[in-house]
Amino acid sequence: MAAQPSIYTHLAETHTHPTGEDHKALHRLPGLLKSGITPITPPPYENYYKHKAHQDLKWYQSQRFNGFTTQELHLHEAFAPYSNLKATGNLTCPIHPILQRSKWRRQLPAQLARYPLGNGREGYWDAWENDTIWNMMVPSLQLTTMFMANLYTWPWFDALFFGEMEEVDPVDLPPELRGKKGYQRFKLRRPEICAQFDERMRVQEMLERFRDDVNLDLSSGHTDTKSGLPDEFKFANTNGTLDRITKRGIGISMAFEILEPLFNAKITEAERMIVTYRFAATVLHELCHAFWDCLRKWGIRTDGEDVVEQNLEPWSEFDKSVTEPLTTNPLILIRKPPDYFVSHTWPITLTYFIDIQNHLWWNTYKAVFGPRSTHIPKLYGKRTLNRPGGSPPEPPFAGFENIDLDTRMIGAEPMNQIQSVVDWFCNSYKQRAHAIRNAIIAHGNLESSYLLPPYPQGGGNEEEDEESDEEEEEIEDEDDDEEIPSYPHYDEIKSYLINQKKELAIDTMKFRMPEHTFHQYIRRNGGINLSAEEWRGFLLNSSERKELFHIREKNGKPPTPYHAILRTLSNGWPTSSPAPTVSLQVRTSEAQTECFSNATRIYLADRKEPWYRLDFWDADLEIFLVLCNNWLADNDQAPLPRNAFEACIQAGIQPRFVLGPKGIVRKLPGSPPQPKKSKKRSAQGPQLGPPSKHRVQNRPR
């Protein structure tokens, strides 16, 4: 059978065809579905409409890529999809102890689950269990290790550990805080101090001290890390100090979506290097948040999160590609620092990602030129002045950083091997900067040299454009419908779910449930061998038949792996009476019953840990037991053993707590407020005629 021709362009096959209102400019373009990232060829165009399409696409790309078109990025040697660059070496350093594989063995609460790889791939996003995932992460963790060995090169990291704190001058506090105390700010140490060998060793000793306090795992950036429900995308999440509950330390959840492109065999080597760098940089960013919690835990920092300069985040000193204006995370001070309203955007040349992942570069160029050499180079960027008070920003200004454009070779006398390598790096950087500058200037001159074609007589075809937009939206809606595969084992799985309805607590699952979490419940319950792909196929067929479950809220779209939410349906489940309740195997004493009632009462409040949301009712039974026993210990009462604790739940001593699937306690929502009963005497016996106005008033609303 002949292969079906692709409906995508070459880049769209690798980078997808984006849909939605933000990408509307792509939907008007004829031919194959496009990625929107192809560098735009400069004008002239023979008519107004083609020139306008060119301008629309330029505007679209500049909105998508922080003010730059992909042609500008390509001329800047920063457009990875067109790059033929190859890795010039690799890192050979051992991974830092705080990032070693054993640190990625984080135990998840029972209401959470690992994410399957998807797209027919076996296994889960689990760095401890899955060798493929671990090997994929190793280059990134080695790069993070190199950055951690050179933390002194970024003043904010040094200040995080050893920077002195000073009280904020009262005149700098806004009126609502005037007269209050306790607001502090960092003071950076001088570079010649923090770069000393002894001080650098102090930093490394501090990291070693934090080694046992941090653990990591992989999760989805599209979901809430405490429930698995959809959430605004985050590259990572630091879960705060969890040891007060379970003694499990500070957890960092990294978004596996960062690593997902590495499964794509069609991306270039430069794109792979960028993915490696992004994951490494994100790990370092999250470690910074974790270090702050560690400093507070050990009593080194006791000032809390109201530190003024903490709002700046040390990250801004590290990643210089996009410098956000401080207004996005405002200071409380009245007197603002320099460039408070200014933001810069700098494309990053691909050679930076390649060089910094080469051990030779660290041993030569970095060794000679010192701390600043590890910072992202700035050549051609755009500066935006943001106005105070929420006013629109001024138009961005493009310009070049002060660079040495002398392309002459440096160093003519004999030199050693290290100096020779360093000079080679210097010469290549200077020559590349000169070539990039000339190419960007020539491109700008070419764009500005063409006049806008005249508007056609008779006006445009706006009505036709609107009709075509409506047709495109209909086509996109059709494309959103996922093809439902035939599923021969449907009846087998359906029978299993019906038979295990009580064990899986389906009757009380009246809330949104992450697809992969319920699959984990099934695996933990046992009795069937069901892969993640088979579970997905069953859910799609179940939704198609409108019985048992409905799958929705997909946080992605094929061919990219996605994870969805399911809800139970009333159709398909047996209508017969439920099976008789199993008698209690453990008898609890009156004292144990009273302890259970007292300890669980405070957890009836909304959003009380371990229930952080009102729309997700499941929690880890073991964690709930620990919390309750901690309360009992604090109040001089005897702790409850696990079997007695479960027996109290099963007996309905506190009706809102019920047993869920294995290892789960489920907190049912509270009853809606009941109307107050009327104090008037009600008539006895049936009443004829319409209800009185008093009865109408007493009805629940």
Image (spheres, rainbow, N blue to C red):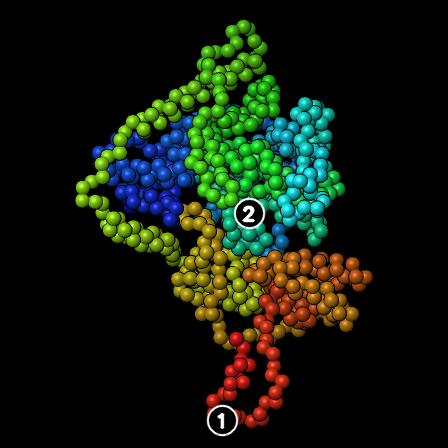
Dot 2 or dot 1, earlier in sequence = 2
Examine the rendering and report whether any part of residue 422 can be seen. yes
The amino acid type, in three-letter code, at marker 1 is: Leu
The amino acid type, in three-letter code, at marker 2 is: Ser
Residue 357 x, y percent position in the rendering: 54, 28
Q: Residue at x 20, y 40 (%)?
A: 456
Residue 214 x, y percent position in the rendering: 66, 42
Most foreground residue, 692 or 416 = 692
Q: How many marks?
A: 2
Q: In the rendered view, tell whether residue 578 sits above or below residue 258.
A: below
Residue 219's tag is 2
Using the numbered discs, state the Cα–Cα distance from disc 2 to disc 1 in whole angstroms.
63 Å
Q: Characterize the local packing of mark 2: few (<14), some (14-19) or many (20 or more) Cα atoms within 10 angstroms.
A: many
Q: Are marks 2 and 1 in contact (CB under 8 Å)?
A: no
Position of residue 230 in the picture relative to residue 298 (left or right): left
Q: Quadrant of residue 29?
A: top left
Most foreground residue, 155 or 112 = 155
Residue 547 x, y percent position in the rendering: 44, 66
Residue 688's tag is 1
Q: Quadrant of residue 599?
A: bottom right
Q: Which one is in front in this view, the residue at disc 2 or the one at disc 1? A: 1
Residue 142 x, y percent position in the rendering: 59, 32
Examine the rendering and report whether any part of residue 102 can be seen. no
